[in-house]
C-alpha cells in the first residue's frame, strides 16, 4: 500500500473512529508477545457488536488503524491470531453434525442445519465484513489480501485466509458490478497519477509520455468498482492505427508527430495492467477486452482489426534452459553455418549480452531460429493442466485470440531484451472465431495460430 493510499484510508476512517469510546491500543509495529492478548480482547470486542452498528463500525475502524500501523512482522502475527483464535470451533461443529443423525422433527432438523451453517462460518469473516462496511473498506480488504498472499510465501499457515478472501472478493467483483470508463487527459490528476504508478508493462516515463498515450489516436479504458470509484482495477492502452503494429518502441515514441487518422482500421492493445495485486485470481481481463472491443466498434466503425502487441515474459529463461540441454540446438545445420561465418561464439554465448544487436550479420543469423523458438515456446510449452506456460499467451488464447505473428526486435528496451531478446507477439482477435478458439483452447489445449506460425512449426 502506497503512503498516499495509507493516508487516504486513515483520513477516511478518522471520523468513524472518533466515535469509538474505548481505549485505543498503542502497539509496537512488531506486535510483541505481551501485546497479543490485548489485541485478542480488542478483536473479540469487535465481534461482540455491543452498542449497535455505530459502535461496531467505530471499533472496526480503530482495529483497522491498528493493523495499518504494523510492519510485516506485526501484520503476520495479527493475521495468524485471526485464523487461529477466531476460526471455526471444530468441536462445536462435530457435536452439531452428530445431532443431524438422530431422530429429529423437520422443524428441529432445519434449526440444527441453520446452526451448523453458522458454526461453519469462521468468526473472522464477520470481522472482514465489518472492515468492508467502512469508508474505503473494500480497498483495505483488497490490500489486506495482497499482504496475505505475499506473507503466505514464508508463512503457509496464512493460506486458508487467502482462500477465504479470494472467494469473498471474487463474488464482490463480479463483472455485473463493474463500470467501464474511458480515461483521457481531462481525467483527474489523481487518477492519471495512478495510471503512471500502476502501469506494469511499459513504464510511463513522464507526463509528456502520458499525454502521448492519451492522444487523439490513443485510448485508455479501465474497470472500476462502485466501492472503489477512484481506483482502477485493470486498464488497457489502445493505439488506433492503419495496420498491425510490430514495434512498441515506435508506437510509444512521444517525440514523433502523431498522424491524425479519421478512419483507422486497426486497434492495437499494447498494454494491459492489473492495478490491484489483491485481486489476483479474480478474472477481469477477459471481460475488459470484450467490452473495450464493443466500445471501440461503436465509437469508430472503420475498425476491422483488433490485435495486441504483447511481450513474451519468460522466453529468454526458457531458451537458456533449452540451450543447456545436451544434444539440443536451436539451429539447423544451415543456420549453424551462417552463424559460424558471422562469429566464433555459440548462440548461448551471444545471447548473454546485447552486443549481437550491433552486428547485422549476427542478427540475420539469429532471427529465424529465435522466431521459430518463440513459436515452439508458445504452442508446445504447457503447464500440467494444459494451459500455455507463458502467462500472457494463456490470457489471450483463453480469450479466443489467434497466435498471429512473431515480431523480430519489437521491443529493444533493456527490459524487452532481457525477457525475450527483443521479440514481441501479435495476438489477433478475429471476432468471428473468438468463441470457437476459446473452446478449443479450454477444452483441448489447442492454440489457434496463423499460417505464418504454422510454417515455423
Image (cartoon, helix red, strand yellow):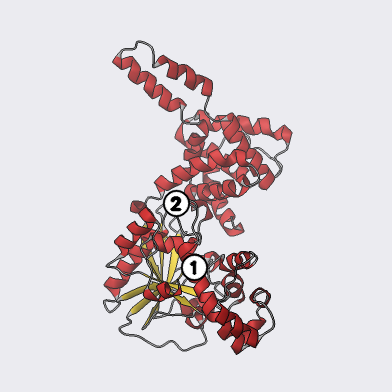
Judged from the image, the secondary structure of the residue bearing numbered disc 2 is loop
Is the Cβ of the residue at disc 2 closer than 8 Å to that at disc 1?
A: no
Please identify the quarter of the rendering in which residue 347 is found. bottom right
Q: Which residue is mark 1?
A: 376
Q: Residues within 10 Å of mark 1 (few under 14, many from 20)?
A: some
Judged from the image, the secondary structure of the residue bearing numbered disc 1 is helix
Q: Residue at x 54, y 47 (%)?
A: 145
Q: Residues within 10 Å of mark 2 (few under 14, many from 20)?
A: some
**Inter-mark Cα distance, 2 to 1:** 29 Å
Q: Is residue 363 visible?
A: yes
Q: Which residue is mark 2?
A: 282
Q: Quadrant of the N terminus?
A: bottom right
Please identify the quarter of the rendering in which residue 452 is found. bottom left
* Image coords of residue 188 (percent x, y): 46, 68
- Mark sitting earlier along the chain (2/1): 2
Q: Which mark is residue 291?
A: none
Q: Residue at x 37, y 66 (%)?
A: 448
* Image coords of residue 93 (percent x, y): 48, 22
Q: Quadrant of the C terminus?
A: bottom left
Nearest the viewer among 455 and 299 is: 455
Q: Residue at x 55, y 47 (%)?
A: 144
Left or right: where does residue 393 sit relative to residue 260? right
Q: Is residue 94 above or below residue 207?
A: above
* Image coords of residue 168 (percent x, y): 44, 43
Left or right: where does residue 28 sit relative to residue 437? right
Please identify the quarter of the rendering in which residue 158 is found. top right
Amino acid at each position: 500500500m502506497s503512503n498516499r493510499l495509507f493516508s487516504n484510508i486513515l483520513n477516511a476512517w478518522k471520523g468513524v473512529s472518533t466515535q469509538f469510546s474505548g481505549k485505543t491500543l498503542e502497539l509496537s509495529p512488531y506486535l510483541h508477545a505481551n501485546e497479543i492478548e490485548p489485541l485478542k480482547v480488542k478483536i473479540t470486542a469487535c465481534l461482540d457488536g455491543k452498542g449497535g452498528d455505530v459502535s461496531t463500525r467505530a471499533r472496526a475502524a480503530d482495529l483497522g488503524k491498528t493493523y495499518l500501523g504494523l510492519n510485516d512482522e506485526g501484520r503476520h502475527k495479527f493475521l495468524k491470531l485471526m485464523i487461529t483464535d477466531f476460526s471455526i470451533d471444530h468441536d462445536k461443529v462435530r457435536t452439531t453434525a452428530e445431532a443431524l443423525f438422530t431422530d429429529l422433527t423437520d422443524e428441529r432438523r432445519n434449526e440444527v442445519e441453520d446452526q451448523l451453517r453458522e458454526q461453519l462460518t469462521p468468526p473472522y469473516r464477520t470481522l472482514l465484513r465489518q472492515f468492508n462496511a467502512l469508508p474505503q473498506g473494500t480497498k483495505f480488504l483488497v490490500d489486506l489480501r495482497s499482504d496475505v498472499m505475499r506473507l503466505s510465501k514464508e508463512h503457509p499457515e496464512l493460506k486458508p485466509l487467502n482462500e477465504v478472501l479470494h472467494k469473498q472478493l471474487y463474488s464482490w467483483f463480479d463483472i455485473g458490478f463493474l463500470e467501464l470508463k474511458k480515461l483521457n487527459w481531462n481525467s483527474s490528476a489523481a487518477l492519471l497519477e495512478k495510471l503512471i504508478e500502476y502501469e506494469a508493462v511499459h513504464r510511463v516515463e513522464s507526463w509528456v509520455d502520458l499525454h502521448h498515450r492519451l492522444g487523439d489516436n490513443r485510448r485508455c479504458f479501465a474497470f472500476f468498482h462502485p466501492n472503489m470509484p477512484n481506483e482502477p482495477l485493470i486498464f488497457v492502452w489502445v493505439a488506433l492505427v492503419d495496420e498491425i503494429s510490430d514495434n512498441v518502441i515506435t508506437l510509444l515514441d512521444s517525440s514523433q508527430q502523431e498522424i491524425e487518422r479519421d478512419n483507422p482500421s486497426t486497434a492495437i492493445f499494447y498494454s494491459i495492467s492489473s492495478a490491484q495485486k489483491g485481486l489476483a485470481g479474480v478474472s477481469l481481463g477477459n471481460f475488459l477486452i470484450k467490452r473495450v472491443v464493443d466500445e471501440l466498434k461503436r465509437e469508430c466503425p472503420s475498425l476491422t482489426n483488433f490485435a495486441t502487441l504483447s511481450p513474451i515474459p519468460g522466453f529468454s529463461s526458457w531458451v537458456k534452459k533449452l540451450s543447456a540441454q545436451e544434444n539440443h540446438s536451436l539451429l539447423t545445420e544451415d543456420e549453424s553455418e551462417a552463424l559460424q561465418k558471422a562469429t566464433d561464439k555459440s548462440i548461448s554465448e551471444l545471447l548473454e549480452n546485447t552486443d549481437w544487436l550491433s552486428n547485422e550479420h549476427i542478427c540475420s543469423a539469429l532471427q529465424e531460429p529465435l522466431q521459430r523458438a518463440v513459436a515452439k515456446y508458445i504452442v508446445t510449452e504447457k503447464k500440467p493442466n494444459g494451459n500455455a506456460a507463458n502467462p500472457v499467451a494463456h490470457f489471450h488464447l483463453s480469450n479466443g485470440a489467434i497466435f498471429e505473428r512473431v515480431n523480430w526486435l519489437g521491443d529493444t528496451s533493456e527490459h524487452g531484451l532481457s525477457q525475450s531478446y527483443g521479440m514481441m507477439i501479435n495476438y489477433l482477435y478475429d471476432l468471428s472465431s473468438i468463441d470457437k478458439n476459446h473452446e478449443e483452447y479450454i477444452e483441448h489445449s489447442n492454440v489457434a495460430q496463423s499460417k505464418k506460425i504454422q510454417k515455423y512449426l
